[in-house]
Image: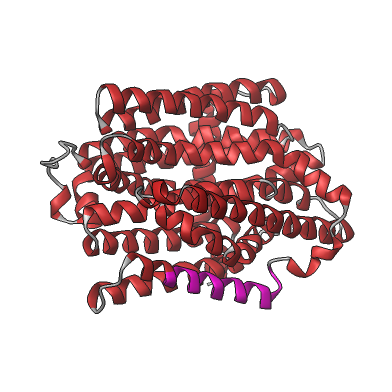
Amino acid sequence: MKKLKKIVREDNFLSLTGNMVIAILGIAGFALLTRSLSLEVFGQWVLFITAGSFVEMFRFGITNTGLIRYLSGADDASRVKLIGSNALIGFGATVLIAIVLIVCNLIFKEAIGNSGYSLFFKWYPLLAFLNLPWNNALVVLQADRKYGKILVIKAINSGAFFLVLLVNFFFLDMTLTQLVFALLIINAFTSFISIIAGWDGTKHITSATAETNKTLLHFGKYTTFTLIGTNLLRSADVLIISLSPLGNAAVALYSIPLKLTELQQIPLRSFVATAFPKMSKASVHHQIEEVKDLFYSYAGALTYLFVFISLFTFVFAEFFVFLLSGNQYLKTDPITGFNVVNIVRVFSIYGLLLPIDRMTGIGLDSINKPKINALKVFFMVLANVIGDLIAIFIFKSLLLVAVASILFTVIGIWMGMYFLDKELTLSYREIFSSGLDFYSTLINKATNNRYESYFKVHKKVN
């Protein structure tokens, strides 16, 4: 029982549980929407969520990564100032974005109204203010490694919206505007809870100083681009498809395999969320060997895990598509000629590459090299956009859009390892051996070291 309690309270377990809850609720909600809305209307919802996610990378990218890094090694006095600066800069960025979107909607009202982005320009400015406090709370709690409280916030926000979608599916027939109203109310409630609990840092906004503002903004000018670029790697496909002759129907079809990649990324997001504060703290205290050990361990363990996940996704692609969207998407779409199952299988191969790519990125940020990480992401985005344009406008193929994801990730791995190796002197081989050590240690703990002698002998032989 004591061992079980220790495991349940462990950082990686809590982080993984939180991301699993969000992913399961998100995917279940997505499945309800695909069954509740027509293909065209569902495409509009996807564009609303995609555009919102993209803008939020800018809003929170300015300070989030920097706050986590500097809070990891901050004293009490500096901590209050940093949290205050995070709240102040986040509010300022939200005001700026809201003004830009409102002005654009007024000037280009007709063009926006005829596009699939009308919901976004109309309602996102309000949503941005309503979800600001609870998003600030998430980053402060991550820096403090309070993953249990993070789980509470995510469960409230995602759980409440899932209940709305569930009630809508069985009893109601809500319009898109009504669904957005529900989203606004739920985000307001989640932020209210975060403020009352004192997790968001709004009360420290007056403690912000010019020095801490400058510190976060200096780090953030690179991480903002990195986060926007990372989001573009996921959303550029949808954005380019939406602007192409393929239209909203193709957006809806492509969003199905894209959503399924979240299943692959549940453990990735969870382990990265725990790895970054640890690596940052080690870096701040000049413990370079510990940074390397953490990089090897996390990258190796995740790579082996993703071999299993990708194989499972590839083999059971049809089942996942059926689970998410029903029978209608299992076969080639008669109108667009696209096959969702085949795209899912391509994305399962793409998943194999994600762990090392993501770990090189947070490795660079943790050793205070956000500029290099931004450069890495820039070339990945460039490769992705070029690949998407060729796939969509020349070959008119969604399958090749997915293939482009594999290509830009290979570029990211090569660049990330190249630059990180210059700072830390790394070895590909050590990644895989450390991954085996991670699982051997895990097995030994689970079996009371029953197999410890076997792993030691096995390691010597190799």
Determine the residue positioned at 55% across, 55% down: 102
Question: Is 263 or 253 nearer to us in this picture?
Answer: 253
Determine the residue positioned at 69% across, 69% down: 199
Please name the colour scheme applied to the rendered image: secondary structure
Determine whether, in the image, residue 333 is placed left or right of residue 244: left
Q: In the displayed structure, would residue 143 be above or below residue 366? A: below
Determine the residue positioned at 17% across, 56% down: 326
Question: Is 247 or 449 nearer to us in this picture?
Answer: 247
Question: Is 66 or 148 nearer to us in this picture?
Answer: 66
Determine whether, in the image, residue 224 is placed left or right of residue 174: right
Answer whether residue 436 is visible to the viewer in this image.
no
Q: Mostly what secondary structure, the magenta segment? A: helix
Image position, residue 185 (x, y; %): 49, 74
Determine whether, in the image, residue 314 is placed left or right of residue 25: left
To which quarter of the image does residue 181 belong? bottom left
Question: Is 115 or 259 nearer to us in this picture?
Answer: 115
Q: Is residue 300 magenta?
A: no
Q: In the displayed structure, would residue 451 be above or below residue 18? A: above
Answer whether residue 184 is visible to the viewer in this image.
yes
Q: In the displayed structure, would residue 196 be above or below residue 176? A: below
Q: Which residues are magenta?
A: 181-199
Q: How many marks?
A: 0
Image position, residue 302 (x, y; %): 48, 41
Determine the residue positioned at 45% across, 67% down: 158
Image position, residue 53 (x, y; %): 49, 50
Determine whether, in the image, residue 315 is placed left or right of residue 282: left
